[in-house]
Amino acid sequence: MNKEDVFKAVNAACIAMDDKFGKDIAVLDISEISPLADYFIIVTGMNPSQTEAMTEACEKAFYANGLPLIMTEGAGTGWFLMDYGAAIVHIFDRELRDFYNIERIWSDAKKVDIKIPAVSAPQRGVGAV
């Protein structure tokens, strides 16, 4: 899979997590500074139920775009990691995101603009009864 296709999957996953009200979604392009992956996605969940919903939505979005989940770590710890090979997703609770400050640690990475529709999640029909 080329980097453009990976980015499409990353963007789809960001939209999916935004639909589940993920906060402060950030994407870092680490491809030029690390062999780990092309992208990191960093997002904050406000509670365990929301975090679970985000992980499920993220997994579906990546799978639909040709990137199956390779492994996960940290369930129930406040920092849940999902490895898709070319992209690694970090879902934090607020306290641990502030503590670990991944964006600062990886400050040499390029911050990437993601294309999340301006329409809010409820207006897209998410969470509608």
Image: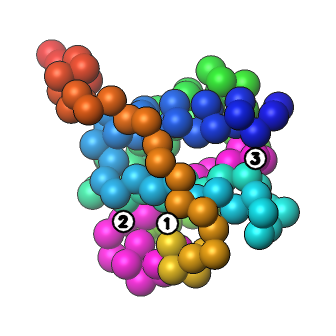
> Relative to the observer, which residue lies in front, 45 or 74?
45
Looking at the rendering, the stretch of residues picked out in magenta corresponds to 80-102
Lateral position of residue 93 relative to residue 39, left or right: left
Mark drawn on residue 79: 1
Residue at 53% in and 52% down? 112
Residue at 49% in and 66% down? 79
Q: Is 35 within the magenta?
A: no
Lateral position of residue 87 relative to residue 11, left or right: right
Q: Quadrant of the N terminus?
A: top right
Mark drawn on residue 115: none
Splitting the image into 4 quarters, where does residue 18 fall? top left
For disc 2, the marked residue is: 93
Lateral position of residue 63 relative to residue 121, left or right: right
Q: Give the mark nearest the N terminus, 2 or 1.
A: 1
Q: Position of residue 19 (x, y in %)?
A: 32, 33
Mark drawn on residue 86: 3
Residue at disc 2, secondary structure? strand
